[in-house]
Image (tube, rainbow, N blue to C red):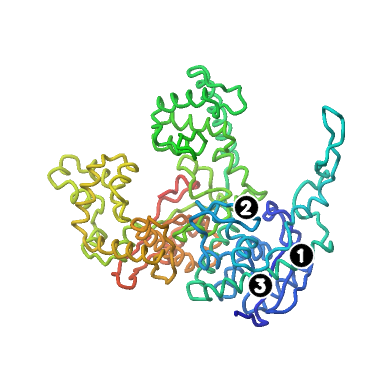
Amino acid sequence: MVTFPDDVLFLDCESHSIHERFDMDPVSYFRLGQMALGEGPVWTTTDREEVLAAIRKARITVAHNGHQFDWSILFGKDSIEPVTLARERRLLDTLTHGTIATPAPFEGYINHKGQPAKSDNPEQYRRWYGLANLAHQLGVDGKLFDLAPLADRYTHTMEPTYSEKTGKRLKHDHKVPIEGLCCGYGAIPVDDLDFVAYAEQDVVALRNLARALLERHGWSEYAQWEQMKAAIASQVTRNGFRVDQPLAQAKELAQLEEAAHTLNWLRDEYSFPVNRKKPVATLEGKAALTEALIQTGVKIKDLAKTDTGAPSFGGESVAKAAAKAGTSEATALAEAVGVLAGQRSIPTLALASVYEDGLVHPSIMALQRSRRFSTTEPGLTVTSPDHKDLYIADSDDDLLVEFDFSNADARAVAAYSGDREFAKRFLPGADGHMINALAAWGAETVATDPSGYRQRAKAPGHGWGYKIGARKMAATTGTPESECRAFLNALNKKYPGVVAWQDRIAKFARGHGYVVNDWGTRLVTEPGREVTQGPALLGQNATHELLLEGCVRLPDRLLQRLKLTIHDAVVLSLAKATLDEDIALVVRCFTRTWKPQGGQAIDFPLSYGTPSRTWQGASH
């Protein structure tokens, strides 16, 4: 059994509401710290400096969600010290370690409350990694109780309710917020005995969980690297990204007006029942919306399916189908349906996420199966190009610059596979998309429309590297299935080394349920999808790992200017006064040659776009 020496500090903090963490200074925001050394007893303190001193003295500090919360709120948003501690290998976040020791299952599970829970996407994976749930799944004692009812005791009063018909008092009272104390845990007195007991048990649960996780997956080189990456992600959270609030408000108003116009059109043209409480749920509403979607270019088959197999007219389903249609009319219709479904537009979400400092401070965690980061509150990595102008440089003296690896995923495939013919597309002056077009359609055909065939080869070429099938390629690219099959066959024949690698990876994944990246960790594959997921996970993960290695090499002054990481790209807000030298330094930090075990050496050069005040202008 794993035991912990006295130089290992277990830490948990109680604070004000999570929504206030970037609006309050660290001293005011912190309320109670609870700690234990090794296997020793838990003690609590209201002295933030005592907690900081304990962290600085400990060889390793352990916390759950420590990168995104505890260490960030203790040191404050202007500090780089959590990154320094991670560089020294002195931080162990059990949430981060849990993502490699016990990945969220593909199938559903029973959570710590005894309720069935889904595990279909990163948002749902996050719930799996909660302290209470992980402790439950690993069979160790977890949290004492839910803190919310205790907070209600100090922020609400209970008042009787009476039947409207009989006037008799009902069994259940209702909660009434106390004015000025309507939310958050900040109203709970730090000397409340239940509160202190709750806090102390959180440290016991943390130690139990750390022991169970380390018994599953030891403190390996890759485990420590994941802690470093999580520290970088949390530094990006603390840095924040400035929002052009007047522009966001104007866009929000324009979208609401457009949605109202579209709903009136639905009512007038298709008798859409806009006066009903849930119009899309009615037969009339579904029939009217079906006609309207078809008219705006949306294919009904592109809508998601409900549990019964019927088309889903929910906001997200319609939005995805409209995006595939690609018409402005379809986009406007989708936004109107989103308003009906209670969904908030991108400008509204941006405004809702802005703190008093004028910045969004998104939550960033490695929740994707490839270990790429998921960014929420707001979801910056899925922001449409039309709304990237909402995000701007830190000040009028700065410009945003977006850097990215050139053809990163394809380079990863070349490196892993060792296919030397495939690697030729990365030689100076070579054009990978044109090479694919020539292989698929032949020089004589391509010569009739070089730019057209080059563009036509782009999307299928990306999919081929990850063993996509002809049917799915046709569905995702709009290319006829017969042409997709011919395209795949042509590239398979031209690059047998890549095909052999894909087959090896798929075979390994079917036999083990995972693939192993060059950094030594397992990437879990979904049963039945090993053929495409195996190569895709390795390629996407390699890009992510190389990008984060570049982030680690940035000097602290530039790391504190890092606004976002997106798959194979980073965005920084750089000072105009030192723009050229800083751009050159960033390029040097990221550009490298990578040779995975069993593969070949491939260059990963970093390029960049035009510096701009807005993210939209800087997009590369």
**Residue tagged by mark 3?**
207
Relative to 216, say whether 163 is above or below. above
Horizontal and vertical percent position of residue 111: 61, 56
The earlier-in-sequence mark between 2 and 1 is 1
Q: Amino acid at mark 1?
A: Leu
Q: Is residue 591 left or right of residue 138?
A: left
Q: Amino acid at mark 2?
A: Gln
**Residue tagged by mark 1?**
32
Crowdedness near tag 1: few (<14), some (14–19) or many (≥20) residues, C-alpha within 10 Å: many
Helix, strand or loop for disc 3: helix
Q: In the image shown, does 91 or 238 lie closer to the viewer?
A: 91
**Residue tagged by mark 2?**
115
Helix, strand or loop for disc 2: loop
Q: Is residue 186 left or right of residue 142?
A: right
Relative to 290, say whether 248 is above or below. below
Horizontal and vertical percent position of residue 334: 49, 32
Location of the N terminus (image quadrant): bottom right
Query: Would you say the residues marked 3 and 1 are in contact, meaning their CB atoms lie under 8 Å apart?
Result: no
In the image, what residue occupies the spot 75% across and 77% down? 41
Horizontal and vertical percent position of residue 573: 51, 55
Query: Would you say the residues marked 2 and 1 are in contact, meaning their CB atoms lie under 8 Å apart?
Result: no
For marks 3 and 2, give the CA distance: 25 Å
Crowdedness near tag 3: few (<14), some (14–19) or many (≥20) residues, C-alpha within 10 Å: many
Q: In the image shown, does 119 or 464 lie closer to the viewer?
A: 119
Closer to us: mark 2 or mark 1? Answer: 2
Q: Looking at the rendering, which quadrant does residue 136 occupy?
A: bottom right
For marks 2 and 1, give the CA distance: 31 Å
